[in-house]
Image (cartoon, helix red, strand yellow):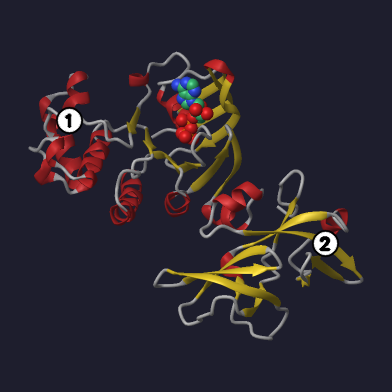
Amino acid sequence: MASVKFENITKEYPKGIRALKNINLYIDDSEFIVLVGPSGCGKSTALRIIAGLEDCTEGNLYIGGQPVKNVRPKDRNIAMVFQNYALYPHLTVFDNMAFGMKMRKTAKAEIKERITGAAEMLHIEELLGRKPGELSGGQKQRVALGRAIVREPGVFLLDEPLSNLDAELRAQMRIEIIKLHKKLGTTFIYVTHDQTEAMTMADRIVVMKDGTIQQTGTPKIIYENPANIFTAGFIGSPRMNFIEAAVILYEDSILLKTDSFTLPLDKTAYNKDILKKYSGRKLIAGIRPEDIDCTAGNNGYVIDAVHEITETLGYEDYVHFDVSGEKITARSGRKEKFKEGTSVKISLDLKRMHLFDKESKKNIIY
Ligand code: ADP
């Protein structure tokens, strides 16, 4: 078991491509950390630097409190699981799992014991005699995990391990990996572009963009208090709705005014002193699809919306509206049915409105 610390780490590839820009991050021993962000944001580079497959250009990396600049990958006490499984096709599952241990001259009996233990944990005992060509994608991924487990590393590095699996298997393997982490109690650092994986698996999520960390926090904090527009839009599906608006402090009320509506914000949910600075200025208001009620009728503060289209998922619907040219998406139960082109009154949960600075893109009340 081990902690991992990034201290001012920058990685520049040839031609001036800066994949990581001054990254500072402390990952505690036994934590399950998910690095999430769009393709090209630097997630894999961060993982490869921990593994020792890449050197950083600036900064220091510590594993278990020790600087690892001069420590070779095989001596770093880590194991990596890749998206493409990286199994040797000519070796059986047993020999794939045994390979690293044989190289390190581990005793035969111990190899057998570790493989048996890992195979039991992953329910792949009956596959040990097969070759990778005789396995399904999900089985190959289990074997790749097994090969990492038998190394008994201090840190597991997982690079998009579920991307090649179909949706059902992905959901199943997500749960298995969470259980595995609980059972092993080892540090897991998991890279993905999939916000659902990040939300469901992580103790803490690290949201990345363009080689920088946008926010670090528990899934709940990231979801409920996104630090900026990027995080707010990236985490959550369907994504948060954004509308340009102004804040007006009028007598004792805080009014949110857009081109098409004016609504009073719940004054207990916002710091008036901070909002004062934004009085009369344009900012970006954000509201999540589940914080919009399309069944409000004429009750409370409602706004006029035109129904455009409904996506039906079975357990719920995503209902898309036009509000004076702004596109708004709401999540709705299965019972409400709207006709295309009809006018609908919708209400926004005014305690749950997020407000972002238009220039810095930061959450002004974060
Ligand atoms: P992610 O894993 O988030 O998709 P990567 O860490 O793979 O992102 O890449 C970050 C940036 O670094 C991208 O712009 C990518 O094109 C660039 N990059 C990655 N590997 C190399 C490399 N070996 N040489 C040059 N540029 C690279």
Image quadrant where residue 151 sits: top left
Q: Nearer the viewer, residue 35 or 189?
A: 35
Above or below, 210 relative to 226: above
Give the residue number, with chain letter if any, for mark 1.
Answer: 96
Count of number-bearing discs: 2
Look at 58% across and 54% down and name the residue there.
Answer: 221
Is residue 66 visible in this depiction of the protein? no
Give the residue number, with chain letter if any, for mark 2.
Answer: 247
Q: Which residue sits furthest left? A: 129
Above or below, 122 relative to 2: below
The amino acid beneath tag 2 is Val
**First reached walking from the N terminus: tag 1 or tag 2:** 1
Left or right position of 17 against 334: right
Is residue 22 visible in this depiction of the protein? yes
| x then y, percent, for residue 319 | 54, 70
| x then y, percent, for residue 209 | 58, 38
The amino acid beneath tag 1 is Asn
The alpha-carbon separation of the residues under discs 1 and 2 comes to 62 Å
Image quadrant where residue 105 sits: top left
Left or right position of 170 against 28: left
Few, some or many C-alpha atoms within 10 Å of disc 2 (few <14, some 14-19, many ≥20)? many
Left or right position of 344 against 259: left
Q: Nearer the viewer, residue 245 or 72?
A: 245
Look at 63% across and 63% down and name the residue there.
Answer: 327
Look at 56% across and 22% down and name the residue there.
Answer: 17
Q: Which residue sits furthest top? A: 70
Secondary structure under the numbered disc 2 in the rendered image:
strand
| x then y, percent, for residue 75 | 35, 20
